[in-house]
């Protein structure tokens, strides 16, 4: 099953992505995995809006959701230049929980089963 949502680049839209994704996940995965996916997706969507599209309202972010019997794939695409480099697992483990910046990608690396950057798309995989 596949589904997607497209949002303009405004901070107000992040909440609608959260609600939409929660609806996709509810009754399909347990609460712990649901919370993990929501947290990671929120960080990556915020990055797409802020860093990728730099809050330009007529640039869009697409969030794709795909579920199979074994996994959930979230693909988030913006209209920017893409993430230059993901932190390694080791760098991610050195996450400073209290730092205001630089936690999104580290959380995504630590909390997902696989993460890949392809141009201005980020694919995040969670095993069910
Ligand atoms: N979608 C994106 N497009 C371009 N650069 C990005 C994107 N997402 C993240 N980045 C880059 O990676 C950095 C680290 O992101 P993150 O770990 O979420 O920390 P923060 O958002 O607090 O800076 C960002 O500061 C930015 O330079
Ligand atoms: Mg961030």
Image: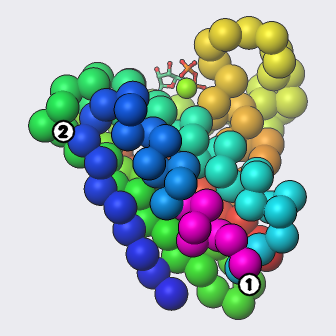
Disc 1 crowd rating (10 Å Cα; few below 14, some 14-19, many 20+) is few
Residue at point 47% right, 33% down?
A: 46
Q: Is residue 125 above or below residue 12?
A: below
Residue 41 percent location from the top left of the image: 58, 48
Q: To which residue does mark 1 refer?
A: 70
Residue 96 percent location from the top left of the image: 82, 15
Q: Quadrant of ligand 2?
A: top right
Residue at point 86% right, 58% down?
A: 32
Residue 38 counted in the magenta span: no
CA distance for labels 1 and 2: 33 Å
As rendered, which of 81 and 78 lies closer to the eye?
78
Q: Is residue 24 above or below residue 58?
A: below
The tag on residue 59 is: 2
Picture quadrant of residue 43: top right
Cβ at disc 1 under 8 Å from ligand 1: no
As rendered, which of 103 and 118 lies closer to the eye?
103
Residue at point 83% right, 18% down?
A: 97
| Quadrant assignment for the C terminus | bottom right
Residue 85 percent location from the top left of the image: 53, 33
Compared across the picture, whether 110 is left or right of 5 comes to right
Main secondary structure found in the magenta portion: helix
Residue at point 71% right, 32% down?
A: 106
* Secondary structure of residue under mark 2: loop
Residue 25 counted in the magenta span: yes
Q: Earlier in the sequence, mark 1 or mark 2?
A: 2
Picture quadrant of residue 64: bottom left
* Secondary structure of residue under mark 1: loop
Cβ at disc 2 under 8 Å from ligand 1: no
The boundaries of the magenta stretch are 21-27
Residue 25 percent location from the top left of the image: 65, 70
Looking at the image, the residue that sits furthest to the top is: 99
Compared across the picture, whether 11 is left or right of 67 comes to left
């Amino acid at each position: 099953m596949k589904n997607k949502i497209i949002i303009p680049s405004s901070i107000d839209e992040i909440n609608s992505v959260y609600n939409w994704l929660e609806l996709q996940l509810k009754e399909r995965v347990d609460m712990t995995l649901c919370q993990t996916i929501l947290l990671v997706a929120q960080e990556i969507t915020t990055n797409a809006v802020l860093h990728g599209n730099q809050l330009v309202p007529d640039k869009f972010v697409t969030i794709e959701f795909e579920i199979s019997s074994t996994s959930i794939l979230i693909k988030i695409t913006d209209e920017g230049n893409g993430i230059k480099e993901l932190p390694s697992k080791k760098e991610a483990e050195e996450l400073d929980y209290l730092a205001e910046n630089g936690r999104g990608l580290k959380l995504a690396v630590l909390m997902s089963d696989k993460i890949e950057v392809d141009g201005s798309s980020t694919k995040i995989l969670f095993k069910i």
